[in-house]
Image (tube, rainbow, N blue to C red):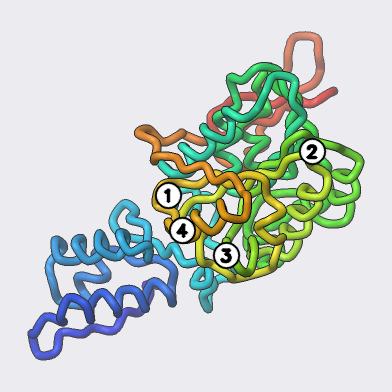
């Protein structure tokens, strides 16, 4: 069923630019995404005018331009009457993809050969994992299906996953990430001591702390903070000032914060005054082509004499073989 957007032609007069942009922002808050075609019909104006409006709102940090429209970047507006939580994992991968790629590459540069590191769930975490594919031998602890999707066939990387309850994308409590959560996952993680933990966030406030929209994900993030020698926050500029969801930890629990150059200068200065190393990166020229976070189960021809055709593959057709 098509979404309803009230027409506003006012007898043929075009709504003034700022009022129109304010109404577009209200639409984004209500339904999290809009298309150019919808806005042209709603406001009775040209595509070029709407594109300029969306460019301006993107510059203000209100939305992220997508093909044929825009999506809200405000964490506290992701909840809509028709949704239980975040937009889908695949959609969120489109938000600030250039920034996330650069953040992932800079975070990967901190990893040393032989390291035991932990990476939690989220789209920025997947970009970090992708950047690690060609690294020297390391071991990665992760509860994230997205991270596993990037690394399962990287020959130099050993993977440890805690198991537990597999979260559902549409579950508000899980935070919209495909990952393992719950007491089994937390208990397994507490038996490990990674050198570094890379943590993502839904929101960041210097005064109030680091936030996550999912209750269960917040618990896993706290566990990783507890067990790691060094804790590094990986988060793009749109998370600054967002205080929606559950508090994960005070900002002073993080040794480093890797973000992009659009992060608010005042916040960056305040974080550095607290003794936190803030690393600013330029958006990447090329965006990492991540693998889908979800594997597709298929049956492949069995090897001669093996009698076993139980292989799993991602959408690219690369097989992920488990033991017979």
Q: Nearer the viewer, mark 3 or mark 1?
A: 3
Query: What residue did someone put label 1 on?
Result: 96
Between tags 3 and 4, which lies in front?
3
Q: Which mark is residue 205?
A: 3
Rendered position, 65 above or below 152 = below
Residue 283, quarter of the rendered image: top left
Residue at (72, 57) in percent of width and height: 217
Residue 238: image tag: 4
Residue farthest to the top, as pictured: 304
What is the distance, in whole Å, between disc 2 and disc 4 at their CAs? 29 Å
Contact between marks 2 and 4 (CB within 8 A): the answer is no
Instruction: Estimate the spatial distance between the alpha carbons at disc 4 and disc 1, rounded to whole Å.
Output: 8 Å
Q: Which residue is mark 2?
A: 161
- Seen at 52% across and 42% down, the residue is 279
Disc with the residue nearer the chain's start (3 vs 1): 1
For marks 4 and 1, the one nearer the N-term is: 1
Q: Earlier in the sequence, mark 2 or mark 4?
A: 2
Give the crowd class for mark 1: few <14, some 14-19, many >=20 residues within 10 Å. many
Question: In the orientation shown, which residue stands out farthest toward the left?
Answer: 12
Cβ atoms at labels 2 and 1 below 8 Å apart = no
Describe the element under mark 2 as helix, strand or loop: loop
Q: For the residues labelled 4 and 1, say whether their Cβ atoms are less than 8 Å apart.
A: yes
In the image shown, does 35 or 259 lie closer to the viewer?
259
Q: Dot 4: within a 10 Å radius of its alpha carbon, few (fewer than 14), some, or many (20 or more) residues?
A: many
Observer able to see residue 84: no
- Distance CA(mark 3)–CA(mark 2): 30 Å
């Amino acid at each position: 069923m098509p979404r309803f957007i009230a027409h506003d032609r006012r007898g043929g007069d075009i709504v003034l630019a700022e009022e129109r942009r304010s109404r577009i922002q209200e639409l984004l808050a209500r339904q999290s995404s809009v298309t150019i075609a919808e806005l042209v019909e709603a406001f009775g104006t040209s595509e070029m005018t709407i594109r300029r409006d969306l460019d301006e709102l993107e510059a203000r940090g209100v939305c992220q331009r997508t093909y044929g429209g825009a999506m809200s970047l405000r964490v506290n507006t992701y909840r809509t009457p028709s949704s239980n939580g975040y937009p889908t994992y695949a959609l969120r991968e489109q938000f600030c993809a250039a920034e996330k790629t650069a953040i992932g590459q800079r975070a990967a540069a901190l990893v040393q050969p032989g390291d035991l590191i932990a990476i939690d769930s989220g789209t920025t975490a997947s970009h970090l994992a992708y950047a690690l594919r060609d690294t020297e031998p390391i071991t990665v602890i992760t509860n994230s299906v997205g991270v596993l999707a990037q690394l399962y066939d990287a020959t130099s990387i050993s993977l440890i996953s805690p198991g537990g309850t597999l979260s559902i994308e549409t579950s508000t409590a899980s935070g919209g990430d495909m990952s393992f959560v719950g007491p089994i996952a937390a208990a397994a993680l507490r038996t490990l001591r990674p050198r570094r933990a890379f943590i993502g966030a839904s929101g960041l406030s210097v005064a109030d702390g680091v936030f996550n929209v999912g209750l269960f994900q917040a618990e896993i993030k706290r566990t990783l903070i507890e067990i790691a020698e060094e804790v590094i926050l990986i988060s793009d500029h749109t998370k600054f000032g967002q205080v929606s969801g559950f508090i994960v930890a005070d900002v002073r629990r993080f040794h480093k914060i890797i973000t992009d150059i659009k992060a608010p200068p005042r916040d960056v200065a305040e974080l550095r005054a607290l003794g936190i190393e803030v690393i600013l990166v330029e958006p990447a020229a090329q965006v990492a082509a991540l693998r889908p976070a979800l594997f597709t189960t298929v049956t492949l021809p069995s090897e001669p004499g093996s009698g076993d055709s139980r292989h799993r593959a991602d959408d690219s057709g690369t097989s992920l073989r488990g033991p017979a």
